[in-house]
Amino acid sequence: MRQTIKKDYDNETQYSSNAIIIGAHCPSEDRTQRCIDLVTRLKDKFPDYTYFICSHLNIDDELLNLTDYFIYNRSNAVINYDIKDKRTDWKVYGIYQPGIGQQVNRSVHNNSYAHYVQVYDGLSMAIGQRMTKIHYMSYDVSFEVIDKISLHRDFLDHYDVVNYTFRDENYINSEFFSITDEGAKNSIMKKLSFDEYINTGLGDFGHENVYANIFNNCNVKTMGHFYTDDRKDPWVIGDFTALPLNTKKDGLNGLPISIDGLVVIPYWKEEDRIICIANGYHYENDGSIASVQLIFHDENMKLVDKVGTKNLGLHYWAQFYPDKNVRFITVEIDNIEKLTFDLLDRKNYGWIQ
C-alpha cells in the first residue's frame, strides 16, 4: 500500500508503484523549458506514474506544478572544487605554452558525485513511498528514452536493473536507467558518502565507472549502447553539454574544464595574476573560435577593461594580465556571454608545472 491521494468510502486512490525520477539542474530558461518539455511528454504517455524531480537548485513554478514530489538538496559538491584529496587531485588538464617553455595545469572538476547524490535522494523518497519500479533520467536526455520505459518496466519483472553501456562494457551510462526497489536497496542505497562512492569506483570518481561496479550484487540487463546507428557517440543520451560548475543565484560560476571548447586557467607567476586561455577542444568548436573577449570588473561589477583575441586556432593560446583591482571576469565567446567567475576564488586557479 502506498500514500493515499484521496478516498471516498471504499473508492481509494493511491500513488502508482511506477515512478519516474528526473535529476535536474536548471539555472537558465532554456534548460528549465527542456525539463518542462520532458516531463510534459512523459506525463502524456504515462499519466498514472508518480513523478519526482531532484535538484540542487529551486525550480520554476510551472515545473513544480508538473511533479508529485520535489526534492531539494542544497549541497552540490563538485569534485576537485568542494571535495578534494589525493584520490582526486591527480586528474589534471593543462595548457601547453611552447613559446615560453611552460605548461599551466589545473585539477579536473567533476560533478559526478553531486549527480549520484541526486539519484540517491530520488530513490530514497521513491522507496520510502513504496514505489517498486523506478526509472531514473537526467533532465536533458533525448526524448527517445520515453519510448524505452515500457520495455524497461517489463524487464524489471525479471531483472533488478536495466541500463546501457557507456563507451564500452567497462562503463555504464548514468543518464538513464531503471531499477526495482530491491535492486536499489542492494546497490545505490548502500553508498552515500564520498568515500563509499569513490571506493565503489575503485579509485576512479567518474560516475560511469562507479555505476559499472555498484550493481555487482544485482541481476542486471545491460542493453549495450542506447543508440545502435552509426552516430559518433552512440552512448551519449543527453542533449546538452555540461553546464559551468556551481551556477549560483548571484550569477557566478566555478570555472569548468571547457567553455564551448575554450580552456581558461588563471594562475599566479611571482606577483602577477595571469589569465591563460586556449582553444583546446576540436569536437566542440570544429577547430576554430572566431573571437574571445574577457570583460574585467571590479568588486562592485563596474567595468575596468576588455581584452581578447580573434581567430584562436586549435591548441593556440593567449594570456592576459588583469589589474589588481579586477575582481570578476566575464567570458564571451563569439559575442555571446558564457559565464562570470570570481578571480579571488582560489579554487578557480591552476599552477605552473
Image (cartoon, rainbow, N blue to C red):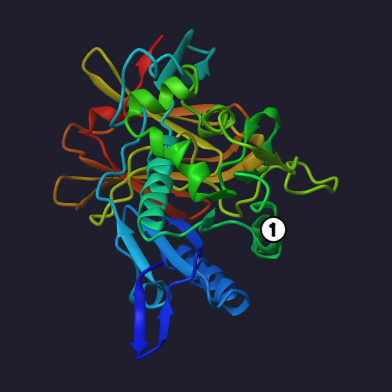
Q: Quadrant of residue 113?
A: top left
Q: Is residue 31 above or below residue 282?
A: below
Element type at mark 1: helix
Q: Is residue 25 above or below residue 279?
A: below
Q: Position of residue 213 (x, y in %)?
A: 56, 27
**Going by the picture, which residue comes out furthest to the front?**
10
Q: Which residue position is annotated with label 1?
A: 154
Q: Is residue 226 above or below residue 347?
A: below
**Going by the picture, which residue comes out furthest to the right?**
230
Q: Residues within 10 Å of mark 1 (few under 14, many from 20)?
A: few
Q: Position of residue 71 (x, y in %)?
A: 32, 59
Q: Position of residue 342 (x, y in %)?
A: 25, 40
Q: Is residue 273 above or below residue 175?
A: above
Please give left or right for residue 328 compared with residue 130 in the image. Answer: left
Q: Nearer the viewer, residue 200 or 143?
A: 200
Quadrant showing the N terminus: bottom left
Q: Amino acid at mark 1?
A: Asp
Q: Quadrant of residue 260?
A: top right
Q: Quadrant of residue 313?
A: top right
Q: Position of residue 229 (x, y in %)?
A: 85, 48
Q: Residue at x 70, y 59 (%)?
A: 148
Residue 244 visible: no
User: How many marks are shown on the rendered structure?
Assistant: 1
Please give left or right for residue 255 compared with residue 133 in the image. Answer: left
Please give left or right for residue 220 compared with residue 97 in the image. Answer: right
Quadrant showing the C terminus: top left
Q: Nearer the viewer, residue 15 or 28?
A: 15
Q: Residue at x 56, y 53 (%)?
A: 240
Q: Residue at x 59, y 42 (%)?
A: 289
Q: Nearer the viewer, residue 309 or 261?
A: 261
